[in-house]
Amino acid sequence: MAYAKAKPSVAQKAWGIVKTDLDWVAANYTSAGCDLWEEVNSNDFFWNRYTMRKALIQGAEFAKSVGGDDSRAATYGAVAKTITKLLDGHVQADGFVIESQNRQKDSAVIEAFNVGDLGDGVFAPLSKEVVATLSGLSRLFCRTYKLNQDATAAGVPGVLFGRYEGDGYDGGNPWVLLTASAATLLYRQAEAAAKGEAPNPAAITELSKLLGREVNPQNLLGAGDAILALMKKYLTNGMHMNEQIDRNTGNLTSAKDLTWNYSNVLKAMNARRAAEKAM
């Protein structure tokens, strides 16, 4: 859809592909599938639901403007509303958003916040739910990884993020792409704050604890910078980015030159640029 917007000459061809995909999503959004890491099965993954919601809402508009198909537009819109209601079931009493019942504390939720946001106030960057989730996962990984503990002891700011609580794959380490994703979220929060969006009191309190200082655009930007700076410390191979950073030694490990790493780092850089521009 984004490509069709940039190149209208392919819009009709794109519509043929889009409607095939979204017809399937609209009919099968309750089906069981795998998580973002292809490890567990469930029918209630937050990442899946939040991104499906975005695709369906955008698809409804695309169906009208390009496909001239009001019937499909109505179907996509109705399913998106149903999914929006289901998202409430992921929010815990303290605001923390779980990925699924069988994989609750998972950074896939952070990734979802970044790629699924439509700017319509549903899990906005400075919402209580987003702040509580970022804060909760920060605490989890601070106590999980020796690298984070050592940084804290040395007075070095920043947190390296991993996948989920109890991850054991290849040692269960911080991931480059997810650390970059956490930085992206902080930059998006900085941009929102710079544009005058105000978190509610509970979110301000939680953000103050997370930052260790006043909540303002500059400090949110600085927190994102601290995360990327800590990660960069371990990118010692000419900025080649392996999938993971060993939780104890800081050595790069697992898959080499993971494309998703570079994509997420570039997203973080773009989010930082947008935040700085808004200040």
Image (cartoon, rainbow, N blue to C red):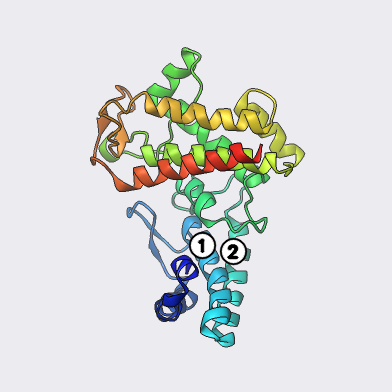
- Give the numbered dot on residue 86: 2
Q: How many marks?
A: 2
Q: Badge 1, how many Cα within 10 Å: few under 14, some, many 20+?
A: many
Measure the C-alpha gap from mark 2 to mark 1. Answer: 8 Å
In the foreground, 66 or 258: 66
Q: Position of residue 2 (x, y in %)?
A: 48, 65
Q: Secondary structure at mark 2?
A: helix
Q: Secondary structure at mark 1?
A: helix
Rendered residue at 26%/37% (across/down): 170
Res 100 visible: yes
Q: Position of residue 225 (x, y in %)?
A: 51, 29
Vertical side of 169 occupied by 120: above or below: below
In the foreground, 34 or 181: 181
Res 133 visible: no
Depth-wise, is mark 2 or mark 1 nearer the camera? 1
The residue indicated by pointer 1 is: 49
Determine which quarter of the picture holds residue 87: bottom right
Rendered residue at 64%/50% (across/down): 124
Q: Residue furthest top?
A: 154
Q: Position of residue 180 (x, y in %)?
A: 44, 38
Q: Is there a contact, CB below 8 Å, between mark 2 and mark 1?
A: yes
Which one is earlier in the sequence, the residue at label 2 or at label 1? 1
On screen, residue 206 versus residue 5, left or right, reads: right
Rendered residue at 44%/18% (across/down): 151
Q: Badge 2, how many Cα within 10 Å: few under 14, some, many 20+?
A: some
Determine which quarter of the picture holds residue 266: top left
Q: Position of residue 169 (x, y in %)?
A: 29, 40
